[in-house]
């Protein structure tokens, strides 16, 4: 944690871990966030994950390069959460990379938590987009990086022989990351990794070794590797190792582990079946024969958690309109709100594959009639992906009028993500002015700059602050304009907030002004 966080962070910290940091175009970025609470009770306003690309190219006629920075995807992972002092709050995310990303660019995942009253913690992780041409360079790299025997791999990753647990786990992580580059062949280290799984006393090392073993042998597994995996699966393993066995089985399915995967789909422990549903989404080859049938089978499992994970996995087959219609129907038939919410999430991008009517009809049906606020809230978190359509206005209007203040807050917040839909501006401005809940009004205020020129937005914010003399409104106004610095209008409003009656917002405004 840096000096500023020590001074202003109030003990909060954000850690970001990617499941995989090398992804092909169109692949899924998945990972987890751990947010540590501060020294006193705090409120998490929002936790956001951005996928950012930086493309540096030479510029004709100039000695300076052209630098193109783009936010490819900006998503809210969580919002409106209480943070107990010193608590560990874990969140998972998964987002699809665009198909047209350029492997020659530099990519990173950036996470940030908005926590009023403390310096917002953030974290980032590099991401490699695979898919550059192999050609001569790839062939040379393959020859130089072959490392297909145990000694060669140990020389390349000396930490694998360390007695220090942290150093060993770090080396296993480095090995796994390098193994995602298919020009690197580390199969010779397989036996060494299995010995760690069998004999090392530390849980973290055993799990990391098994995960690395699965990645090293992915697409290269031979019958002896399948037999070793089957032997592991047949034992009474601790849960943390069984989770990795399931993931590895999904990776090895095309090489011969499909019968094992089919057995795991009938495993008596629902935790194993739940993990398999997720592994079929994240780890199995998309073209694996029988993958669709297995996921559909798990969607009909008797356990709620298994069904929810399986319907979540259906998002990986969003181009299959027949399946999406079935998923949409299940959203109206399954008795579990958790499952219904995953169905709602799974069909969110079906409009890109001819399912526009399906998505709008399903979302409107549940926004208007589903008794679960959690399901209706799930819709609010997906609407910013939808195309311009008259039904979008009806959908947003319905959700901004929901009987649940929590649902209205979530919908109001999404104004920050909907600047491409200027036709919705009046709905969000009305929520910022007229909603009976002060938190809804504040969340709607955060996005007013998306729907009007900055001078008009600042004038509107001043008008609201004159009536909304509460800390939430001042923070909302601050969040709305701080991204526009150093514009004159943004600076002027921040100066007013810095002199305002609410110390935490005033302190943050002064930080923004000092750092411009």
Image: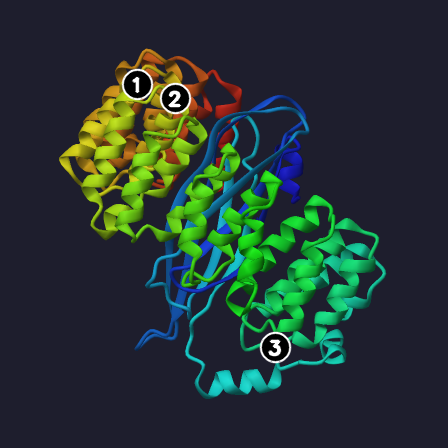
User: Callout 2: helix, strand or loop?
Assistant: helix
Which residue position is annotated with label 1? Answer: 402
Nearest the camera: 463 or 324? 324
**Residue 286 at what x, y percent from top left?**
42, 60
Residue 36 rendering spot, x and y as whole percentages: 64, 34
Tell me the element at label 3: loop
In terms of depth relative to the viewer, which is nearer, 375 or 263? 263
Residue at figure coordinates x 44%, y 46% from the top left? 297
Q: Are marks 1 and 2 in contact (CB under 8 Å)?
A: yes
Q: Secondary structure at mark 1?
A: loop
Please name the residue shown 30% across and 24% down the image.
461
- Name the residue located 25 percent from the left edge and 41 percent from the top edge: 386
Residue 516 seen: no
In the image, 501 versus 250, the foreground residue is 250
Q: Nearer the viewer, mark 1 or mark 3?
A: 3
Q: Mark on residue 373?
A: 2
Q: Residue at x 81, y 67 (%)?
A: 161
Is 354 displayed left or right of 23 in the figure? left
Q: Is residue 505 visible?
A: yes
- Say which label, 2 or 3, has the lower sequence index: 3
């Amino acid at each position: 944690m840096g000096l500023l966080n020590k001074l202003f962070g109030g003990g909060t910290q954000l850690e970001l871990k990617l499941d995989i940091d090398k992804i092909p175009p169109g692949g899924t970025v998945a990972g987890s966030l751990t947010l540590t609470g501060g020294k006193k009770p705090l409120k998490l306003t929002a936790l956001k994950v951005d996928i950012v690309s930086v493309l540096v190219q030479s510029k004709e006629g100039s000695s300076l390069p052209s630098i193109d920075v783009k936010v490819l995807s900006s998503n809210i992972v969580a919002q409106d959460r209480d943070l107990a002092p010193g608590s560990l709050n874990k969140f998972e995310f998964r987002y699809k990379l665009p198909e047209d990303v350029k492997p020659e660019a530099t990519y990173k995942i950036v996470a940030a938590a908005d926590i009023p009253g403390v310096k917002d913690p953030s974290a980032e992780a590099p991401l490699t987009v695979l898919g550059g041409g192999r050609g001569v360079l790839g062939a040379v790299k393959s020859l130089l990086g072959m490392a297909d025997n145990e000694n060669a791999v140990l020389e390349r990753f000396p930490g694998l022989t360390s007695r220090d647990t942290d150093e060993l786990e770090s080396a296993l992580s480095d090995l796994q990351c390098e193994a995602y580059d298919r020009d690197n062949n580390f199969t010779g280290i397989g036996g060494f990794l299995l010995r760690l799984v069998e004999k090392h006393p530390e849980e973290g090392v055993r799990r990391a070794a098994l995960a690395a073993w699965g990645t090293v042998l992915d697409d290269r597994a031979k019958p002896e590797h399948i037999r070793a995996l089957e032997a592991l699966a047949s034992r009474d393993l601790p849960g943390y190792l069984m989770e990795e066995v399931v993931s590895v089985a999904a990776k090895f399915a095309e090489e011969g582990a499909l019968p094992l995967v089919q057995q795991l789909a009938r495993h008596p422990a629902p935790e194993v079946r739940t993990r398999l549903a997720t592994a079929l989404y994240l780890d199995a080859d998309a073209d694996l024969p029988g993958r669709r049938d297995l996921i559909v089978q798990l969607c009909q499992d008797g356990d709620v958690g298994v069904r929810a994970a399986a319907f979540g996995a259906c998002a990986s087959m969003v181009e299959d309109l027949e399946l999406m219609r079935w998923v949409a129907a299940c959203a109206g038939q399954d008795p579990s709100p958790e499952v219904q919410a995953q169905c709602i999430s799974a069909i969110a991008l079906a409009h890109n594959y001819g399912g526009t009517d399906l998505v709008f009809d399903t979302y409107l049906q549940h926004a208007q009639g589903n008794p679960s606020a959690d399901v209706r809230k799930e819709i609010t978190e997906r609407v910013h992906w939808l195309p311009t359509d008259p039904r979008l206005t009806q959908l947003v209007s319905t959700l901004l009028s929901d009987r649940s203040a929590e649902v209205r807050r979530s919908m109001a917040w999404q104004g920050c993500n909907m600047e491409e839909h200027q036709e919705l501006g009046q709905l969000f401005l009305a929520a910022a002015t007229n909603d009976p809940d002060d938190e809804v009004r504040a969340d709607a205020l955060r996005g007013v700059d998306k729907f009007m020129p900055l001078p008009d937005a600042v004038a509107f914010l001043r008008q609201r602050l004159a009536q909304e003399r509460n800390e939430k409104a001042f923070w909302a106004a601050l969040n709305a304009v701080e991204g526009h610095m150093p514009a004159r209008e943004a600076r002027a409003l921040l100066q007013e907030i810095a002199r305002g009656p609410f110390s935490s917002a005033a302190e943050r405004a002064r930080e923004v002004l000092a750092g411009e």
